[in-house]
Image: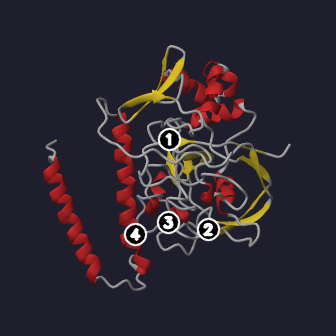
Amino acid sequence: MPLLDPAEARRYLAQVRDKALDVLDHVRLDERPLVAGGFAFGMIVQHEQQHDETMLATHQLRTGGPVLSAPPPPRSFTRVHGEVFIPGGPFTMGTDTDPWALDNERPAHVVDVPAFLIDAGPVTNADYLAFIDAGGYDDPRWWSARGWAHRNEAGLTAPMHWTRDGGEWQYRRFGRVSAIIPNEPVVHVGYFEAEAYASWAGKRLPTEVEWEKAARWDPETGRSRRFPWGDDPPGPEHANLGQRHLAPAPVGAYPAGVSPLGVHQLIGDVWEWTSTDWHGYPGFCVFPYAEYSEVFFGGDYKVLRGGSFGTDAAAVRGTFRNWDHPIRRQIFSGFRCARELA
C-alpha cells in the first residue's frame, strides 16, 4: 500500500481539518438529532482521539529507539491503600443528558446495586509482582478454564513488555527500558490475567455497574456525577489524560480526582477491566449507525472503563464504555478488584 510521507500526511490532515472547520462555521446546531448540541462534531472529535490512542499503543509495539518524549507524571501526593465500602441501593447508570454521549451510554436507567467493597486504587506493579512471585502464572487454581488455556497457548509469564534482567523486572516503554516502578498501576495485562490475580487475592473483578456506581454516585445528593470529582471537565489536577505523560501516574497522584466515597484514579492512567460482557442497556437505541456499538453486542468482549494516560479528555467520562477481547494486552489496560461484604 502506498503511504504518504510525513509532510504529505500533514498537508492532507490540514486540508481535511480546514474543510471540517468550514462546515462547523456554517452549520445550524438546531434540534435535528445529528447536530443537536453539536453531537456529530463531538462524535468526530471523540473518534479521532480514539484513533490517536490506538496510534500511541502502536508506538509501544514498535521496535527501535525512542521517538516520543513527555514529562513524567506527578508524584504520589497521598497514601492510597485498602478498600472502599460502597453502600447498597439504587443509582442512575448511563445518561440521557450528556450531549456527546454515544448510543451505548444511553439511556439513563436506575440499577439497584448490593453493597460491595472496591479497591481504593488500581492494582500496582508491586501488587502484581507479588502474584508473579507467588507462582500465580503457574497455578491453574487461580485461572478460569479459558484463561488457563490461553495462558498456556500464549506462554504468558508476566505483563506484556515486562522482562527479567537477572533478579530484577524491567519494563520497555516506547523504546526505553527501566526498572518497574512499584506504585505505578500495572498496565498491559489482559482480562484473563486480571481475573487470575483477583482470584489469587481472594477477590474478583468489579462488574461494570459496580465500577460506575463507585465512580459517579454521590451519597449526599443521591445523584450521579459526570466524573468522580463532579461535572466539570477534567483538568490536569484531576486525572492523567491526553498523553501529557506517557505512563500511568503513581497511585495517589491525583487526590483532586477522588470520587465522593474515596475511590482514586477511576479516570485516566489505565483502562480498567470489568467482569461484564459487552451489551446494550435496557431500551438501547441505535444512533447514528449500528456499526459503532450494536454489531459488537454479544461477541467475545469484556467492558473496560475509565480511560488511560493515552485517552483524550474529550473521549472519556464516567459513563463512557470501552470493550475489547479478553486476550487483548497491547491496549493500556489495568484493573482494580472488588468483593462482596464478608
Residue tagged 1: 325
> Could you tell me which quadrant the N terminus lies in?
top left
Quick one: 238 or 114, which is closer to the camera? 238
**Which sits earlier in the primary sequence, circle 1 or circle 4?**
4
* Residue at 50% in and 35% down: 327
- Mark 3 to mark 1 CA distance (whole Å): 20 Å
Quick one: 104 or 170, which is closer to the camera? 170
- Is disc 3 placed on a helix, strand or loop? helix
- Mark 1 to mark 2 CA distance (whole Å): 31 Å
**Which sits earlier in the primary sequence, circle 2 or circle 4?**
4
**Which sits earlier in the primary sequence, circle 3 or circle 4?**
4
Residue tagged 3: 103
Give residue 207's position: percent from left, percent from top. Answer: 67, 49
Residue type for callout 1: His
- Mark 1 to mark 4 CA distance (whole Å): 26 Å
Quick one: 173 or 72, which is closer to the camera? 72
Residue tagged 2: 230
- Mark 3 to mark 2 CA distance (whole Å): 22 Å
- Is disc 1 placed on a helix, strand or loop? loop
Q: Quadrant of residue 145?
A: top right
Residue type for callout 4: Gly
Residue tagged 4: 42
- Mark 2 to mark 4 CA distance (whole Å): 21 Å
**Which sits earlier in the primary sequence, circle 3 or circle 2?**
3
